[in-house]
Image (cartoon, rainbow, N blue to C red):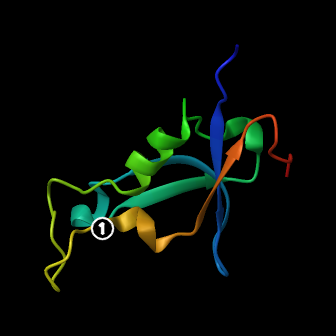
């Protein structure tokens, strides 16, 4: 039985594409994402749990927001987790 490989589609009103990479520590802990319009260049994850862990990553440089809540910069984006076999090519 082969393991499913997942990729992430970012689909916000102003930002969309395939997640190519991210740096949670960029911009003093505010994070950054790199997107691509080509699915074959998308970052791959071994399972959905790995996507969940990445999505909820907390930067060491700024672990808490000014409101006292955990700083999770990637949650500013809407992620759609897709199995590589099921994801459409853009």
Query: Which residue is found at the position 59% from the left and 35% from the top?
Result: 44
Q: Find the residue positioned furthest to the top.
A: 1
Locate residue 56 relative to residue 21 in the image: left or right.
left
Asked if residue 58 lies left or right of residue 44, the reply is left
Q: Say which residue appears at 22% left-offset and 56% top-offset.
A: 59
Q: Residue at x 85, y 52 (%)?
A: 90
Number of numbered discs visible in the structure rendering? 1
At which x and y percent is residue 32? 41, 60
How far across and down, in percent of the image, does residue 63 sit? 16, 63
Q: Which residue is the extreme one toward the front?
A: 1
User: Could you tell me which quadrant the N terminus lies in?
Assistant: top right
Badge 1: few (under 14), some or many (20 or more) residues near its Cα, within 10 Å? some
Q: Is residue 42 above or below residue 30?
A: above
**Where is residue 28, by image quadrant?**
bottom left
The residue to which callout 1 is attached is: 30
Is 69 or 18 nearer to us in this picture? Answer: 69
User: x, y (%) of residue 69?
Assistant: 19, 76
Secondary structure of the residue carrying numbered label 1: loop
Residue positioned 45% across, 73% down in the render? 76
């Amino acid at each position: 039985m082969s393991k499913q490989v997942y990729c992430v589609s970012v689909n916000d009103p102003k930002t969309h594409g395939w997640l190519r990479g991210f740096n949670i520590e960029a911009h003093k802990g505010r994070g950054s994402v790199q997107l691509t319009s080509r699915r074959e260049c998308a970052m791959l994850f071994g399972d959905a749990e790995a996507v969940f862990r990445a999505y909820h990553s907390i930067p060491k440089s700024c672990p808490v927001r000014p409101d006292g809540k955990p700083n999770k910069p990637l949650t500013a984006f809407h992620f759609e987790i897709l199995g590589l076999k099921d994801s459409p090519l853009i």
